[in-house]
């Protein structure tokens, strides 16, 4: 069961960090007058979101457990990272493992490699098919440029596809038109230093643009028990741009891109087949990547419109004791919305994704005799994903009772065709009250490590009972995990400054990934353990 409440108490703001914000031009002052920065509660509940149905609808009219972090929430929070912003979302668990590593999940099943939460940046998936999770240390933006973060608790697979099992997080940045002029941000403290610069201009009547650069450095934490460094320093630099164009009164085109480089440190366990067998060492991950997104929206008629989006994403992560990963992803997505038929609001779409990777063991900065943690075969692979979906909002009683029916077919290279349907019912007896219920199926398809990986869990040194070192190893042989979720919820606005929502859910999981050790091996002879004894 989940519940949340929102309270609005004036416009006060408390600054926690040492923060410097300088407007380079008078236009920068527009941010303070932007209505997204000063929403009262009624406006928050009537704020249009797109993540629940892939079309604009208000929070109160969404038949789902949805929470929106507004630009005003972000400004008041003092947070400098996206995971820290997510702490304010009910039903989302955020645990900080180190200076640069988080465990973020929805509705439980938390861990560093949480594999049932889909995360999007302006509609671009940042979910990694390597391990079915998110590298949070490279998900960043100029915090002041985030317009809102839409969080759906529960499955969203009918629209967003496989892996949107326990939730969907959609991080949406502000348009170029709302970030005109200059902005300079500086942060300084005992552990973290950094800043960002952004400038926006216009193409006349054609549209607007902005460009930014950002960098930061965070010192390693200190292990309380020993007083030594935790080896988790973090530094990163990134730059990017966005252009929003309106070539005609019916067309809107967005082109945006980012590039980043950085390092993330961590303490790693080393396993050897020779003495000392086990050790702990500081390692340093080298990170780099970039993306480019093109989105075209067109109003075909008063009732019909479509969106065509394409992006390319490149990422590289040299992770000692794991792998030197290079991945390039190409994605093409088409969505059509029609309200041509009375009482129906149809959304349909097609998508194709191609991902190519190379995963090679990395021994950078550690002895070559160390055993890498995952051994993924083959070292290079291609993965294709083809999908089609259809969803219809049927007005059984106009503006009072809405039935939503939808389904998505998705074909992947591991398990073939997966079907993910959903049904939702929304009843709005009064302007301030909404009741909803839903039943939906979602699937988490296997990752590269799930289907072709061997995980070297631990090497046991020789002992009286084990004369030779023994390797404890697991194997990736899993199938798709599936979920059928039953939900019911109510949203109530009591006044202009107080509202609450309550959701109750029951999840049935099938074929969950579980740990199964394969036969123990003696090292270095690699004979079965009984032979060692």
Image: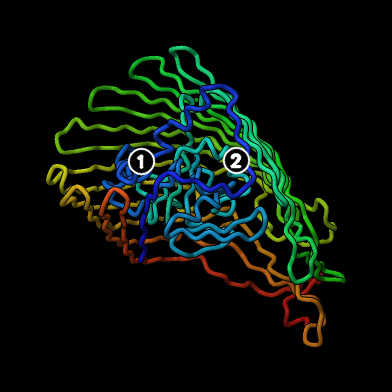
Q: Residue furthest right?
A: 275
Q: Nearer the viewer, mark 2 or mark 1?
A: 1
Question: Residue 188's spot in the image, x, y percent?
Answer: 69, 44
Compared to residue 342, the image places residue 434 above or below, namely: below
Compared to residue 183, the image places residue 206 above or below, namely: above
> Which badge, 2 or 1, comes first in the chain's sequence?
1
Mark 2, residue position: 356
Residue count near mark 2 (Cα–Cα under 10 Å), binned few <14, some 14–19, many ≥20: some
Residue 316 showing in the rendered view: yes
Residue at x-position 39% and y-position 51% = 152
Residue count near mark 1 (Cα–Cα under 10 Å), binned few <14, some 14–19, many ≥20: many
Residue 324 showing in the rendered view: no
Q: Name the secondary structure under disc 1.
A: strand
Q: 505 or 278: which is nearer to us?
A: 505
Compared to residue 430, the image places residue 530 above or below, namely: below
Q: Name the secondary structure under disc 2.
A: strand
Residue at x-position 69% and y-position 75% = 520
Q: 77 or 269: which is nearer to us?
A: 77
Instruction: State the scheme by which the image is colored.
Output: rainbow
Mark 1, residue position: 49
Compared to residue 179, the image places residue 276 above or below, namely: below
Horizontal side, residue 374 vs residue 152: left or right:
right
Question: Residue 58's spot in the image, x, y percent?
Answer: 30, 42
Question: Residue 89's spot in the image, x, y percent?
Answer: 44, 55
Q: Residue furthest left?
A: 397
């Amino acid at each position: 069961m989940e519940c949340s409440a929102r309270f609005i108490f004036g416009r006060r703001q408390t600054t926690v960090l040492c923060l410097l914000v300088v407007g380079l031009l008078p236009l920068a002052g527009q941010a303070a007058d932007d209505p997204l920065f000063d929403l009262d509660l009624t406006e928050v509940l009537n704020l249009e979101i797109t993540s629940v149905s892939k079309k604009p609808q208000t929070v109160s009219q969404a038949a789902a457990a949805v929470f929106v972090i507004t630009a005003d929430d972000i400004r008041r929070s003092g947070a400098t990272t996206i995971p820290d912003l997510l702490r304010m979302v009910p039903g989302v668990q955020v645990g900080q493992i180190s200076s640069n590593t988080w465990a973020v999940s929805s509705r439980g099943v938390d861990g560093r490699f949480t594999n049932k939460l889909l995360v999007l940046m302006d509609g671009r998936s940042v979910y990694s098919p390597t391990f079915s999770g998110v590298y949070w240390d490279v998900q960043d933006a100029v915090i002041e440029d985030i317009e809102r973060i839409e969080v759906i608790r529960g499955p969203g697979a009918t629209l967003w596809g496989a892996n949107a099992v326990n939730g969907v997080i959609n991080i949406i940045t502000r348009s170029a038109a709302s970030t005109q002029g200059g902005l300079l941000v500086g942060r300084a403290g005992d552990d973290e230093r950094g800043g960002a610069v952004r400038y926006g201009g216009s193409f006349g009547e054609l549209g607007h643009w902005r460009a930014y650069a950002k960098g930061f450095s965070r010192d390693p934490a200190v292990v309380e028990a020993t007083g030594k460094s935790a080896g988790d320093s973090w530094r990163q630099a990134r730059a990017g741009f966005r252009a929003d164009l309106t070539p005609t009164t019916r067309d809107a085109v967005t082109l945006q891109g980012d590039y980043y480089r950085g390092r993330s440190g961590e303490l790693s366990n080393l396993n050897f087949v020779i003495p000392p067998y086990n050790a702990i060492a500081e390692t340093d991950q080298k990170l780099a990547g970039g993306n480019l997104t093109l989105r075209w929206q067109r109003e075909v008629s008063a009732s019909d419109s479509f969106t065509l989006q394409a992006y390319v994403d490149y990422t590289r992560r040299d992770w000692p004791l794991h792998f030197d990963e290079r991945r390039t992803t190409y994605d093409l997505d088409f969505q059509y919305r029609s309200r041509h038929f009375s009482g129906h609001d149809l959304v349909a779409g097609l998508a194709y994704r191609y991902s190519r990777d190379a995963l090679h063991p990395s021994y950078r900065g550690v002895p070559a005799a160390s055993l890498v943690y995952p051994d993924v075969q083959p070292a290079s692979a291609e993965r294709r994903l083809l999908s089609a979906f259809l969803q219809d909002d049927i007005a059984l009683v106009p503006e009072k009772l809405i039935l939503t029916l939808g389904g998505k077919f998705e074909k992947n290279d591991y398990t073939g065709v997966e079907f993910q349907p959903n049904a939702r019912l929304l009843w709005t007896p009064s302007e301030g009250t909404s009741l909803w219920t839903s039943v939906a199926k979602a699937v988490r398809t296997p990752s590269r490590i799930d289907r072709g990986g061997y995980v070297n869990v631990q090497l046991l040194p020789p002992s009286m009972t084990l004369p030779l070192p023994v390797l404890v190893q697991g194997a990736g042989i899993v199938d798709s995990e599936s979920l059928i979720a039953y939900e019911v919820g109510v949203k109530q606005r009591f006044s202009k400054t107080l509202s609450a929502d309550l959701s109750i859910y029951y999840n049935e999981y099938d074929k969950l990934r579980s740990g199964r050790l394969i036969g123990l091996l003696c090292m270095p002879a690699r004979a079965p353990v009984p032979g060692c004894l």
